[in-house]
Amino acid sequence: MGTVIKINEGIVEDAAQLVPLARWLEWREAGQVPHPGSGVWLEPDDDFDALLPDLDRLTLIAVNFPVFTDGRGYSVARLLRERHGYRRELRAVGDVLRDQLYFMRRCGFDAFALRADQDAELALRAFDDYSVSYQ
Amino acid sequence: MYRYDETDQRLVDERVVRFRDQMRRFLAGELSEDDFRPLRLQNGLYIQRHAPMLRVAIPYGTMSATQLRMLARVAREYDRGYGHFTTRCNIQYNWVRLEDAPEILAELATVQMHAIQTSGNCIRNITTDPFAGVAADEVLDPRPYCEIVRQWSTLSPEYTFLPRKFKIAITGSRNDRAAVSFHDIGARAVRREDGEIGFEVYVGGGLGRTPMVGHRIQSFLPRRELLSYFDAILRVYNRYGRRDKKYKSRVKILVKELGPEAFTTEVEREWEFLRGGEASIDDARFDAMERHFRAPEIPADGESALPRNGEPAFLRWLARNVTAHRLPGLAIVTLSLKQTGNPPGDASAAQMEAAADLADRYSAGEIRVSHEQNLVLPQVRIAELLALWQAAVGHQLATANIGLLTDVVCCPGGDFCSLANARSIPIAEAIQRRFADEAALEDVGPLELNISGCVNACGHHHIGNIGILGVDKNGEEWYQVTLGGSEDAPPAIGRIIGPSFQAADIPEVVEKVVTVYRRQRSEGERFIDTLRRIGADPFKQHLYGGADGHRDQD
């Protein structure tokens, strides 16, 4: 994983290890304790109910956007934040473009692994695209 | 009418800034066509057959004279002097320059207008009854609810990248002039005996290549939960709607595949967590919103009955284009954009300016756009109807054909649209010419005729009493005819009556259909009622199998 923008931390080089949901659940089943820096990688259609008991001890959840026009991840984020009370890092990964950052943040993402061709410095300004909102 | 506050204005202004930057990056090659496409579509900008097409929103079809003058200005300055009013309360400009789009949006923003979400896979412009707030048969005024939904859906962070477009219609009347059964979500306001206001909610209706009548999934949704319930529907759709095939990705397909009951269960499960939450609306919000939509003043001049005397053309216009108002002394006037020879729904800049002037002079500066692609003046004093008519005639806005066969609903078709398989405007014109005799047209009575140039059904041919669909056969334009569609009472999708026809035959086909109706109708019976009573067979017989049937089956 390359450049990650984290709210309040700016641009960081990130080496966090992300594992698919299925792998995480296998580890948990086997009683293995993952590295503290590890996080779970969710696909937009993953049924993440099985993960809910772990939310308190997870420090990173990444939600994949296979293409930026696939908006399922926005609903996943709102569910994790608003319904299930997940408070730590929620990262958008995959086809993450500057023009989506504002919406992603409003759904609860606070970290963004940009697509490789995106300019991170410019992307930082995207959070100010709108100063007002209706929802 | 709703007036923007500082927040509304800032949002639209910031949207312009954002889009200007996106356009700049696209033109500079910093943004690829693939990355730009959804962004421009969410700002109503298409790449079309001849030029880019810009679709501007007229939220729930309501606008001021000032706004209509701006639409005229855009037509004049940035297009070829006209615009096309669509079936979904938008106006389309077919000849704009790509690089002018941000400037057009900036100008529109100065009069509280925008093109936000007029296209793309997001919640589209909210539509309603063109007679909202003034109709005599109305349970309540749906406009405050439309505005609340408009705001909620504007730049919605969660629902900007849906599987497919999403259309919401709201009506406040039992007589459905908003076609709520044919929307992704349709809501019909109801007032319970105890005075509480709520909504019947329909989901999964739609036209296009898989036309469906929506299912009622709520019989009384309390008004405070309107948004939380919509949120639940949208979230279920966003998470589970198909994204693999464009033609399978509308919510109607999800409702069909899950079944309405299972779909409703999913929505209810989601709603359990959302109801009573942040999206709930309190009474103060409703009160504040309702203050924007005040009832017109009752005129003091005492005229409350329509004129009975006058020249025949005026009386015909009164009978066709004037509708009962809910307040005494006032009337609702429809300005027809269906004069023969003019593409249905098109208005020139001069006509728009004329309509704006008429609205200022006779209708408190307010205009509506109907989904039949006409303009409506919602509050005209009965005493001034004659003066209004005389003024409207001079601008070709007074064709006395509302609800008649020549009031054709029609998409731009192959002349403009790159999706179309066939032209539709010339077909509309040929039919209008065939029925040029006013007395004969009047004798046929109410009859909805809808024409679409392709299966995407922008001309809503499925819900026309007579529907005409352009189809491509080996590079030739052919036309399929459906009978029996209706947007209301009860809502129905028309059925194809048989093999398709060539363009030149269509006026004859329509005439034959009308002939069967005139032979078979009972006294005072409308076309659709005769058709429902006798079925389609007599029509088929006359078209394909009767003595007049000359054409080959294909």
Image: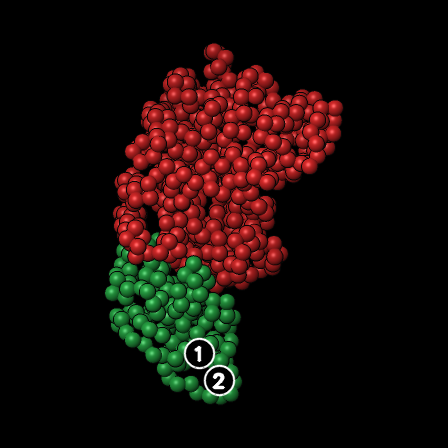
Contact between marks 1 and 2 (CB within 8 A): the answer is yes
Query: In the image, is residue A59 above or below residue B158?
Result: below
Circle 1 sits in a helix, a strand or a loop, which is it?
Answer: strand
Measuring from the top left, give residue B321's x and y in whole percent. 48, 24
Query: In the image, is residue B342 above or below residue B286?
Result: above
Q: Earlier in the sequence, mark 1 or mark 2?
A: 1
Of residue B427 and residue B284, the one placed in the foreground of this image is: B427
| Cα gap from disc 1 to disc 2, whole angstroms | 10 Å
Dot 1, how many residues are within 10 Å of its Cα: few (below 14), some (14-19), or many (20+)?
some
Q: Quadrant of residue B248?
A: bottom right
Q: Quadrant of the C terminus of chain B?
A: top right
Horizontal relation, residue B128 to residue B25: left or right: right
Q: Mark 2 belongs to which subunit?
A: A
Q: Residue at x 49, y 80 (%)?
A: A23
Q: Residue at x 53, y 59 (%)?
A: B244
Measuring from the top left, give residue B69's x and y in whole percent. 32, 31
For disc 1, the marked residue is A19
Colour used to depict chain B in the structure image: red
Query: In the image, is residue B427 above or below residue B316?
Result: below
For disc 2, the marked residue is A27
Horizontal relation, residue B535 to residue B2: left or right: right
